[in-house]
Image (spheres, rainbow, N blue to C red):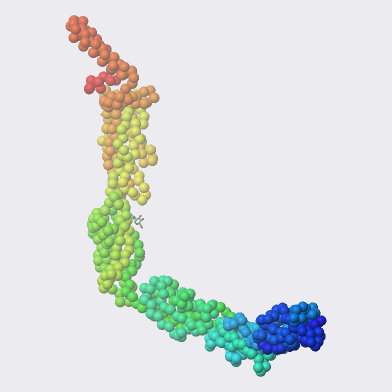
Amino acid sequence: LWNAHSKRFLLLRSRDFILQGLHTDLDVGGKNIKYVLAGEGAGTIFAINELTGDIHAMKRLDREEKAEYTLTAQVVNADTDEPLEPPSEFIIKVQDINDNPPQFNEGPYRAAVPEMSAVGTPVTRVTATDADDPVYGNSAKLVYSILEGQPYFSVEPNSGTIKIALHGMDREMREEYLVVIQAKDMGGHMGGLSGTTTVTVTLMDINDNPPKFSKSLYEFVIPEDLPVGKMGGKVKANDRDIGENSKSTYSIIEGDDQGMFEIVTDGQTQEGILRLKKPIDYESKRSYTLRVEATNVRSEPSSGGPFKDTATVKVVVEDSDEPPVFLKPVYVLEVNENAPVNTVIGAVTARDPDSTGSLVRYFIDRHTDLERQFNINVDDGKITLAKPLDRETDMWHNITVTATEVRNHSQISRAIVAIRVMDINDNAPEFATEYEAFLCENGKPGQVIQTVSAVDKDDPIQGHYFDYRLVPEMLNNPNFTIKNNQDNSISVLAKHDTFRRQKQEMYFLPIIVTDNGNPPMSSTNTLTIRVCGCSKDGIVQSCNVEAYVLPIGLSMGALIAILACIILLLGEVFLCCGVISVNWFDRCTLTLSFCISVLKSFNLFYPVLTI
Ligand SMILES: *[C@@H]1O[C@H](CO)[C@@H](O)[C@H](O)[C@H]1NC(C)=O
Ligand SMILES: *[C@@H]1O[C@H](CO)[C@@H](O)[C@H](O)[C@H]1NC(C)=O
């Protein structure tokens, strides 16, 4: 339709070659006019017949590519190209036809839904699009239908929502389904275009299966020497579920009152590992019948239960060759130190615990008895003394004794035998040190010359008690006496004050010391007493010969006197080398007698003479 003064619409159906005429009111006879076309697609898509004004589409048109074209038309003088009227704009609209099928742009789809879901449970939703004009006709009106996947699933025709359609779908029966969905335009009617997509639906596991033991009776043969904590056997409860839903814990529910066994779950294999909690012993119990239970870790109350299973486990204890067993792990024996060689000190006993018990032989581990102090009887385990003992050298002899099966020499066990050597009174007491006693010339009667104590190597349980006595022939000694200090020591006292070095410079006092052992032991120890000159306070200043040897005993005065004598004597000797006169003898005699009197006054006469 054409009108030069108003906009006119032309509707073209897509892909049609449509011709429409343009006419002008000016088109009056004889005038030389022509029609000119401009705008979108002029000359390429659209062409105009200059004479008639008919417009041709030169190509197929596609609404989904471009739905509208805006063009202008004008009437001009054919000779001069002068416009005879103003240009007039018009729009060409391309009319839709159903030339696009629905498309699932997001497919193929994957979806998951728990097994055993109720009918009508939504699984997922699929959506198709159609490029055709949604407002014109039904070209884009889509309807969904299910091509494959029945009777398990259904699809809502309008929304594309896929739902469970069958009751009780079990993952353990079948886990995966392929659903094919079709979308059809034209409202699903005949002649519409269609597209399909697939949906892979996976059923998710729920805990709907109980564990089930692979056997109802397991039998394990376990050697009696199987260490505690070591595996004795395995049970397995299978569960058709997967993941957490298939996990079980195992427990012993019957037959283990003594708590000998435990069953733990191997997290990797889901097996129940039977282990020992206490050592088993063939000789005391040969079989156990246990009832074990497997329980699902995860409890799903909605899916029923209880999800557990039980089985019987029979444990047969197997005899194994065990080493001999000593009645005691440690023996403590005692023997007197004076016990003669071959004395029986004691005995050890070991038995083979096996039902077919073997004889046992005994040995001493010689590394523990390097001096071969002891012997053992190989047959009866009696330990005897091989060499004399001395408690004062070794109080303990801790040896290792082995017991070996006669039948199988590799079955050995050991026990420690601690032999304690018991004290007997075999040592006499003696003075604690070599006492050096001094006595002051000017001391009073009753002065304490020396305190004396004794020691004894023995170690009696009741402790030491020493008895000190003067030897019988000195019991009435006029010079010294002894006094008991009541603390296992004595004091030696002087009986008078008339001791003089000139008379007797040294005294010997034999003392008998006796212990309280059974029988008692005694020894005679002689105390040497020197007579010395002392200061008024009783400090020893010089004693007989020995005192001089220790120059500390010499006073300053004595030293000066000795030096003076030597100088004088030397002077005399020099003089006599010159002139020997009668006078010289006199002078020498005078000097000598002076020196002697000086030395005498300092109690040094005898020592110097000795030199
Ligand atoms: C020997 O064994 C006894 C008792 O077990 C112990 O008191 C002592 O110290 C041990 N002696 C040695 C030298 O091992
Ligand atoms: C006592 O001492 C005197 C000298 O002072 C001596 O002759 C006598 O032998 C001494 N007696 C004994 C028993 O030592």
Identify which residue, 110 or 588, lies in the foreground. 110
Q: Is residue 167 visible?
A: no
Residue nearer the viewer, 273 or 352: 273
- Count of all numbered marks drawn on residues in the image: 0
Where is residue 344 shown, x and y percent of the image? 26, 61
Give me the residue at 36% from left, 23% from top: 535
**In the rendered image, which quarter contains the C terminus?**
top left
Left or right of 581? Residue 537 is right
In the displayed structure, would residue 188 be above or below residue 420?
below
Residue at 21%, 5% in the rendered image: 583
Vertical arrangement, residue 423 with respect to residue 167, above or below: above
Of the four image quadrants, the one with ligand 1 is bottom left
Q: Quadrant of the N terminus?
A: bottom right
Place residue 469 in its image quadrant. Answer: top left
Q: Which residue is drawn at the image coordinates 28% and 48% (left, top)?
A: 426
Whole-percent x, y for residue 56 in the image: 70, 86
459 relative to 114, above or below:
above
Percent x, y of residue 318: 36, 78
- Residue 328: percent from the left, percent from the top? 35, 65
**Residue 36 against residue 470 in the figure, above or below:** below
Quarter-of-image position of residue 66: bottom right
Q: Name the foreground residue: 351 vs 390.
A: 351
- Asked whether residue 566 is in view, the answer is yes
| Residue displayed at 80% across by 79% down | 85
Of residues 326 and 128, the one drawn nearer to the viewer in this rendering: 128
